[in-house]
Image (cartoon, rainbow, N blue to C red):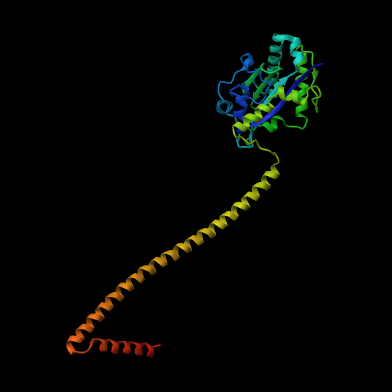
């Protein structure tokens, strides 16, 4: 027996480029060897996104006055992977396969009163061994602001509020799809025994999204634990403060060095001035000796010796 399969994944703004490229087959190479690029022309859109997911969301926010505080932690879109197994699609044929995915699209548009306008893209991939639908939507809810006014906002956590929210999704999808004439069993709640891990990777975009995020140099957030994030933030703040302190000390040291360098420059200048003055004084003394020699007909060497003895005696008395 085949199963009605619906799986959800949430994506942040940094992940949207890779998701868009995968769904719209914008890449040249794919790590998933199950993709037959020759069959990609058979892929079709139930709802076409004519721009990137990021631009489409910005337009939605503007057009519908959606409230949303977008950070690197904000889940902006959800993506449903909707499928069954290969044997099911081979049995029902091409036309019923199209009806199956259109029925699934209608289910999502009405589930939790979402509204078709918040579906960004619905792309059916037929270039893998198992047909499947990538349906990307913005989780918009109706709520009230602090003043009691009705508002619409993007709130993934509230859209999936409740620990049994995915169970309810599978219950409702199974009910809707079988009521529309498709003979399927409900997907497993906790296991995918009907679909091996390798099969599930082939059906979904797991390997390709992982590859494309790497190509985009995107690092998805690894934790949703707010307490852990806050603790890490405190450690980071403490480390930054230490760096500031070291930087402040470095500035002080640099200022001291600059002052010493200036003082050294000033001393060098003063030393040069003293040398010049000393040179002038020596010249003046020599000329004085010459004058005395001529005036008094006194031997110059004897006069210099008398003067030197006088200076030494003066220095000795004033020590």
Q: Quadrant of the N terminus?
A: top right
Residue 253 image position (x, y, % from top left): 51, 62
Q: 239 or 158, which is in the foreground?
A: 239
Residue 314 image position (x, y, % from top left): 35, 89
Q: Is residue 43 visible?
A: no
Q: Is residue 123 visible?
A: yes
Which residue corresponds to the image point at 66% horizontal and 20% vertical from the top-left? Answer: 35
Which residue corresponds to the image point at 26% horizontal and 87% vertical from the top-left? Answer: 301
* Placement of 12 over or under 273, stated as above or below: above
* Placement of 249 over or under 46, stated as above or below: below
Which residue corresponds to the image point at 62% horizontal and 15% vertical from the top-left? Answer: 38
Q: Is residue 168 left or right of residue 299?
A: right
* Furthest-left residue in this view: 295
Q: Is residue 184 left or right of residue 125?
A: right
* Placement of 237 over or under 25, stated as above or below: below
Which residue corresponds to the image point at 59% horizontal and 29% vertical from the top-left? Answer: 17
Residue 240 image position (x, y, % from top left): 59, 52
């Amino acid at each position: 027996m085949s199963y009605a399969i619906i799986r959800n994944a949430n994506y942040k703004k940094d992940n949207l480029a890779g998701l868009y490229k995968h769904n719209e087959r914008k890449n040249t190479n794919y790590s998933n060897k199950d993709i037959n690029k020759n069959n990609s022309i058979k892929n079709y859109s139930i709802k076409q996104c004519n721009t990137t997911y990021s631009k489409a969301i910005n337009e939605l926010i503007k057009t519908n006055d959606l409230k949303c505080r977008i950070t690197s932690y904000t889940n902006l879109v959800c993506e449903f992977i909707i499928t069954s197994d290969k044997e099911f699609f081979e049995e029902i044929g091409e036309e019923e396969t199209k009806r199956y995915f259109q029925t699934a699209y209608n289910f999502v548009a009405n589930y939790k009163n979402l509204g078709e306008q918040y579906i960004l893209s619905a792309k059916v991939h037929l270039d893998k061994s198992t047909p499947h639908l990538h349906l990307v939507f913005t989780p918009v809810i109706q709520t009230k602001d602090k003043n009691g006014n009705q508002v619409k906002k993007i709130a993934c956590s509230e859209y999936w509020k409740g620990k049994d929210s995915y169970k309810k999704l599978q219950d409702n999808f199974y009910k809707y799809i079988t009521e529309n004439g498709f003979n399927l069993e409900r997907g497993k709640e906790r296991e995918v025994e009907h679909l091996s891990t390798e099969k599930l990777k082939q059906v979904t975009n797991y390997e390709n999204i992982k590859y494309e995020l790497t190509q985009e140099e995107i690092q998805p957030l690894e934790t949703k634990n707010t307490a852990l994030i806050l603790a890490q933030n405190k450690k980071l703040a403490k480390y930054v403060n230490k760096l500031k302190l070291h930087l402040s000390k470095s500035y002080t040291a640099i200022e001291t060095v600059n002052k010493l360098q200036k003082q050294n420059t000033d001393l060098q200048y003063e030393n040069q001035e003293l040398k010049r003055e000393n040179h002038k004084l020596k010249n003046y003394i020599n000329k004085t000796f010459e004058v005395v020699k001529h005036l008094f007909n006194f031997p110059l060497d004897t006069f210099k010796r008398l003067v030197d003895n006088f200076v030494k005696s003066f220095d000795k008395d004033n020590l």
